Image: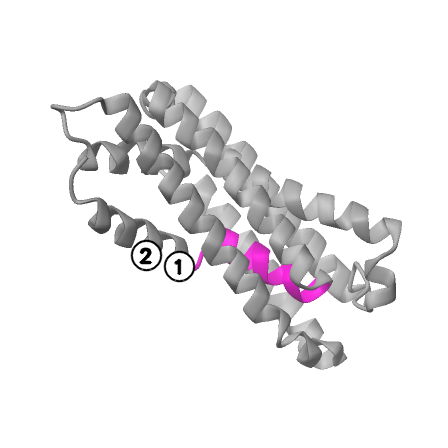
């Protein structure tokens, strides 16, 4: 395995680049606090583990070469992002910033269910994104030394990427938690929800229009 540090920098740059994951973590952190963002980050890492495993086992090649499978996963993922974006916009219109933000309500069973929802959103957003599968399939082999155990190298690189993504979004959740106080004001909260909802819808449309 060569140029490991270059791979780390590449994976970090890919993680930081704003996208659906960034919007999801931001939305859930500002709605539920740090725990909401952390749950989403764990979900994202879980979804990426699916693609890492697939890349290591060679299953990503099947998805990349099969127009039907690529299209199926792509449209399901796009529909899911579109759905989350619509739900976000509707909650803004209804004035229902769900779940509630107070510490007391955060400890309630409904909030526990919301944390599970955050995890599921992060996991599904990534699992249903064929671009993530192709990203791993095309990126990981470039840093593998053919003279050594390729399976071990691919595993290390894949796990490294997942860990980098997890650390970045955990950090982002912590940072965003400090500015939650601004979103207790209806104007800021409503504006942000509209922006986030539109972002998620646009990411869904972009994914749906993505060519194989």
- Left/right placement of residue 11 relative to residue 41 reads left
111 falls in the magenta region: no
The answer to whether 68 appears left or right of 191 in the picture is left
124 versus 69 height, above or below? below
In the image: residue 113, left or right of residue 87: right
Q: Position of residue 49 (x, y in %)?
A: 47, 33
Q: Kindly state the secondary structure of the residue where label 1 is placed.
A: helix
- Mark 2: which secondary structure? helix
Question: Mark 1 packing: few (<14 Cα in 10 Å), some, or many (20+)?
Answer: some
**Location of the C terminus (image quadrant):** top left
**Residue topped by disc 1:** 16
Give the image quarter of residue 195: bottom right
Q: Residue at x 40, y 59 (%)?
A: 16
Question: CA gap, disc 1 to disc 2?
Answer: 5 Å
Where residue 41 appears, as percent x and y from the top left, is 56, 50
- In the rendered structure, does residue 19 fall within the stretch colored magenta? yes
Cβ atoms at labels 1 and 2 below 8 Å apart: yes
Which segment did they paint magenta? 16-31
Residue 151 higher or lower than 120, as above or below: above
Q: Which residue: 74% across, 58% down? A: 90
What is the x, y in percent for residue 63?
38, 23
User: Residue 113 lies in what quarter of the image?
Assistant: top right
Q: Please tell me which residue is depicted at 58% across the width and 69% down the height of the picture.
A: 176
Kindly tell me whether residue 15 is visible in this rendering.
Answer: yes
Return the residue at label 2.
13
Q: Residue at x 87, y 65 (%)?
A: 104
Residue 27 in picture, x, y percent from top left: 63, 61
Total numbered labels placed on residues in the image: 2
Colour setup of the view: one colour
């Amino acid at each position: 395995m060569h140029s490991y540090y270059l791979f780390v920098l590449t994976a970090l740059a890919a993680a930081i680049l704003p996208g659906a994951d960034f919007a999801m973590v931001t939305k859930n952190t500002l709605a539920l606090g740090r725990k909401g963002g952390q749950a989403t980050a764990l979900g994202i890492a879980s979804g990426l583990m699916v693609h890492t495993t697939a890349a290591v086992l060679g299953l990503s090649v099947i998805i990349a070469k099969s127009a039907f499978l690529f299209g199926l996963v792509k449209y399901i993922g796009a529909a899911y992002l579109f759905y989350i974006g619509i739900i976000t916009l509707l909650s803004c219109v209804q004035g229902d910033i769900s779940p509630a933000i107070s510490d007391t309500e955060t400890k309630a069973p409904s909030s526990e269910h919301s944390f599970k929802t955050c995890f599921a959103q992060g996991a599904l957003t990534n699992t249903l994104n064929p671009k993530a599968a192709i990203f791993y399939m095309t990126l990981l082999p470039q840093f593998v030394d053919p003279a050594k155990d390729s399976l071990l190298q691919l595993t290390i690189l894949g796990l490294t990427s997942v860990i980098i993504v997890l650390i970045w979004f955990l950090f982002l959740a912590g940072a965003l938690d400090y500015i939650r106080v601004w979103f207790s004001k209806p104007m800021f909260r409503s504006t942000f929800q509209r922006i986030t909802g539109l972002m998620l819808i646009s990411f869904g449309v972009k994914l749906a229009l993505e060519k194989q």
